[in-house]
Structures are given as structure tokens and as C-alpha cells.
Image: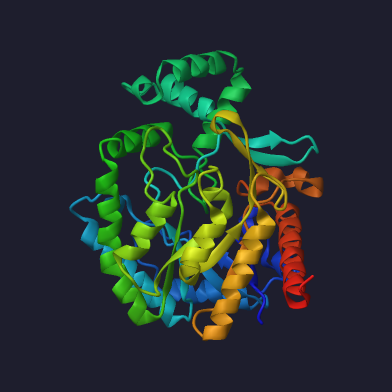
Amino acid sequence: MQYLKKTLRWFGPSFGVSLKDIKELGVAGVVTACHQVPIGEVWSSKIIRELKGEIESNGLEWSVVESVNIHKAIKYGLPERDIYIRNYIETLKNLAENDINVVCYNFMQLIDWTRTNLYYELPTGAISLLYDPVAIAAFDLFILKRDRAEEVYGVPMVQKAEHYYNALDKQELERLKSAILAGMPGSKEAIALTDFRSTLEEVSKIEKPDLRENLAYFLKAVIPEAEKLGVKMALHPDDPPFPVFGIPRIASTYDDLKFILDCVPSSSNGLTFCSGSLGAVSTNDLVKIIHDFGSQIHFLHLRNVSREQDGRFYEAAHLDGSLPMAKIMVAIVEEQRKRHMSGEGDVGIPIRPDHGHVLLDDKKRKDEFYSGYSLIGRAIGMAELYGLEKGIREMLITGT
């Protein structure tokens, strides 16, 4: 039976990792996007073809698109959303024309992901990413100074946030702002504080049922076209999977994922299974999600997190942390078996090690990397995940 297809995310040569580097790691392909095209505009077939040619000239394939980002007019249900949906479908057509058929995307309403410390030092000395809800509240209350923000948090959290904020020195304050405003993937430019504030104010007026309906509207328009093209859409869960800045989440729980898949029943309406995103809360049963939605999983992001008290978590080594990675891999291999036996679906599901610690020589050039995307840390993660997969396969074959 075919192994999982090993891939690595690549943001381009200016992000510290070259295609030559990736080739040396023995992966099959890369996960990338046309980052230079503004969100909402069509990716031309020419631009796609040029990027694909660059990847293939290095002996790799373009395995998955991550991401064709969704314009806020679609997320917020603005009058012009149909224009951007038409553009999105046109981009899918151009990708399919170039034989690129798996598209990871997300519907996160504010920014793609949120962390409060991009340089969290572990006891080993390696550098990881940290999320701290107290830091989020401090940013909202005392840096953004958003009107009525205290209503989101309540008195005890406001007191903790004030104490946290008052203890920050100038450098720590700048690091907090930089972490939260880290920008969209594919860009090293931070989001302007004024832009972040206005976007937050805008989305704060939208309730969860409306956000869900906006996603359903998008899916009902796009999925039938994707199915005609043979494109698999793989929605990435919210990161983290709980409200941030008081903004509701709509792709964070088992029920959310079921709602999304039931909106438009189709093999093209699928998921990116991200263990680190879904696993940041203990209430998500990751093995059950794989068992119940496995046939709709088109892409795998595997990483681990260590959950701490009061909603804090940091990104642990891939086989450590709070998540049962061995059980997760068993469930994935069992899903592969089902596909192999039925002849339905891609048995070699694309997988990438999601994020990685900054350690060893990568520390010398840590500012070159997009946060979470060092070279050595991800290479270790891929090796660990491949070894785990191989060991589980041997165990299942021999029964020992």
C-alpha cells in the first residue's frame, strides 16, 4: 500500500529555504501558492505555469496549493462577494488546467493564525511558537484600546491582562505586537495596527450564524465547479480553535466540520486535517474526526501542541506534547487501507510537517524564515512522522 506523500511548504527563495534544500530532504513535492497575486484577484494560467515550472526544474512536484486565500467580501457577506467568487472559480480552472488539483484554504475571519510569542524558548533551547490568552487580552485592551473590549474578557481576565501589560518592557511590547500582526503567509510585512483595528471592528459586528451562512454561500457556489474540474477543496480548521478577540469560530469543532461537509455533499468538499489547530483544545477528539470524516480528508498537517492552564499552548516536538500522535497516525493508515480496498480516493494523501522548532544552525538565520517554517525543525518533524508511519505499518502487518 502506498505511503503518505511527503511534502514541505515553500514560500519562495527569500524565506530562507530553497527548492534545492527541500529536494535534499527526500520529499516528493512542495506546498505553495502564488503569493504575489493580491487576495481576490485571479491567478493567471501563465503565473501558475511559471511557478510550477520552477518547482519541476528542481525535481519536485507542486503537490498542494496553500492557499488560495478568500477575500473578506466573501467572508463578511459584502455585496461585491459574487465578483470575488467568480475570480476564485477562475483561479481553480487555471490550476486544474495545470494539473494542480488539491487546494487548501481557510475561512478565518481576522487573520490566518494567531500567536503571542514567535520566539518562545523551550527548556532544550529550541525556539517555538506560543499562544497566551492573557497576552491577547492585553493587546486588545491596552494596545488596540478597542471600545468596549473589556466586555469580551470579564473582570478577572482584564485584571490579569493589565498586570501582564504593565510588566512588559519596551522590547517585550514590540515583540507582542509583531507576533500578533505577523501578516499573512507569504509576506514578511506586518499588518498595520490601524488596518488590524478596522478589520477587527468590522468583523466584530458579524454573528456566528451569519459567518456560517457566508461560508455555506461560498461552498454552494464553488464546490460544484471544483467537482467538474476534479479539484479537491480542503478547508483548514481555525487556528486556534476558539474565539480570539471575541470573534466566533466556525471551523473549530466536530460539529463545525460536519456542518461544512454537509453543506455541499461532494468528494470535492473536503478538509485539511490539522492536528495542531484542532488539538489546541482537549474537547476535540482527533481520532474520531479522522474515523468519521476520513474519506473527505485531502491533506494532512501534523504537529503537536502542549496545552497548559488557562488556554495557553505552545508548539511541541512532533511526537511529544498533548496530542496522541501514534493514535492519530494509526487512524490515518486505517483510512488509507479503506481507500486502498475500495479503490476510492487518493491513498497517498499529501502530508507535511506543520511548523518546526528553530534550532542548531537555523538560529543563525531565524529572521529569514516565515514563523514556524524553519528548515531543520521541519526536517526533524518529517523524519519523526515518517518513522512513526513506517513503524505503525509494520506493526499492523505483523500484528505485533
Q: Tell whether 78 sits left or right of 199.
A: left
Tell me: 343 left or right of 76.
Answer: right
Depth check, front residue: 154 or 36: 154
**Residue 95, relative to residue 190: is it above or below?**
below
Image: 37 above or below 136? below
Percent across and percent down for residue 201 are: 30, 33
Quarter of the rendering occupied by the C terminus: bottom right
Is residue 65 visible in the rendered image? The answer is no
Q: Picture coordinates of residue 230 (x, y %)? A: 40, 80
Q: Quadrant of residue 7?
A: bottom right
Quadrant of the rendered image containing residue 4: bottom right
Q: Residue at x 39, y 43 (%)?
A: 110
Residue found 49% across the figure and 83% down from its top = 344
Q: Residue furthest left?
A: 79
Is residue 142 visible in the rendered image? The answer is: yes
When asked about the image quadrant of residue 82, the answer is bottom left
Residue sitting farthest toward the front: 399
Q: Quadrant of the N terminus?
A: bottom right
* Left or right of 368 in this view: 67: left
Residue for point 24% across, 47% down: 210
Residue 214 location in percent, x, y? 26, 54
Picture coordinates of residue 152, whole percent (x, y)? 37, 26
* Residue 16 to residue 393: above or below: above
Query: Residue 16 or 377: which is nearer the viewer?
Result: 377
How are the residues colored?
rainbow
Q: Is residue 338 left or right of residue 193?
A: right
* Residue positioned 53% across, 26% down in the render: 135
Tell me how many marks there are: 0
